[in-house]
Image (cartoon, grey):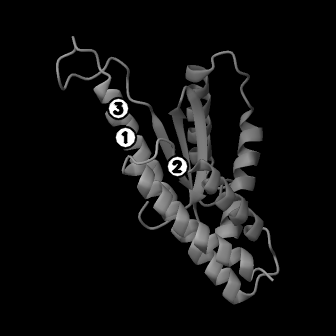
Amino acid sequence: MYEEDLNNLEDWLRRLKVEYDIFFNGHRKKPPDDLKMRVERLVKKLSEAGDLSFQQRFRYNTLVARYCVFKDLWRRTLTERESAAEADDQPADRPAGARPEASPKPVVTVVISDPAAETQNVRKLYQSLVQMNKTCQPDSPTVSFERFASYLTRQTEELQKKYDCSCVVFTLAIQDDSVRFMARPYSRRD
């Protein structure tokens, strides 16, 4: 029943890797976002399919793991290119190697397995979120700690169930003048 979707996912992943290679080699001006969105929609659709056989689920998990590795590689490569482009844009009156006046963007990473038992980590994440939010959007309303803790608990439980992991890595970062809140399953290399 899902074999065609799994075959499509495998083919699209292969094509997406080739498209990103072409983009990073400079033969295309824009990344293949349309194909990436199709892959992400199919990944989401298959993740919600509760009637996959064990073989299909294993194949799906393998493909998703491969996609996550590629996605992280593409994100890091794009970030490196953007930072290299920013370095090229530095004013001529600044000496070579001099640091720009802007401070580095803060990144906060916290690993949580049980939010109810790890209130100190939850509070650290909450305080960092509030501080970063005030930096980026001083007029934005602040969410209450209780609401944030409830949201964090739900996210942790969902990711632990979905990826069969014991811990979840939460990361806060400032990107494009806004706070980015990310969650992913914990792996040994973290």
Question: Which quadrant holds the N terminus?
Answer: bottom right
Question: Which amino acid type is shown beneath numbered disc 3?
Answer: Ala
Q: Nearer the viewer, residue 81 or 104?
A: 81
Q: Residue 160 appears in which quarter of the rendering? A: bottom right
Q: For the residue labelled by badge 2, is the local secondary structure a helix, a strand or a loop?
A: strand
Residue 12 locus on image (x, y percent): 60, 67
Residue 93 lies left or right of residue 179; in this view the side is left
What residue is pinned by disc 1?
A: 81
Q: Could you say which disc has been placed on residue 85 in the image?
A: 3
Q: What residue is pinned by disc 2?
A: 110
Q: Is residue 43 above or below residue 135?
A: below
Q: Secondary structure at mark 1?
A: helix
Q: Position of residue 91 (x, y in %)?
A: 28, 15
Foreground: 3 or 105? 3
The crowding category of the residue bearing disc 2, from other C-alpha atoms within 10 Å (few below 14, some 14 to 19, many at least 20), is some
Q: Are marks 1 and 3 in contact (CB under 8 Å)?
A: yes
Label 1 is placed on what type of residue?
Arg
Residue 13 appearing in the image: yes
Please report whichever mark, 2 or 1, sits nearer to the chain's N-terminal start: 1
Q: Earlier in the sequence, mark 3 or mark 2?
A: 3
Residue at image point 67% right, 88% down = 55
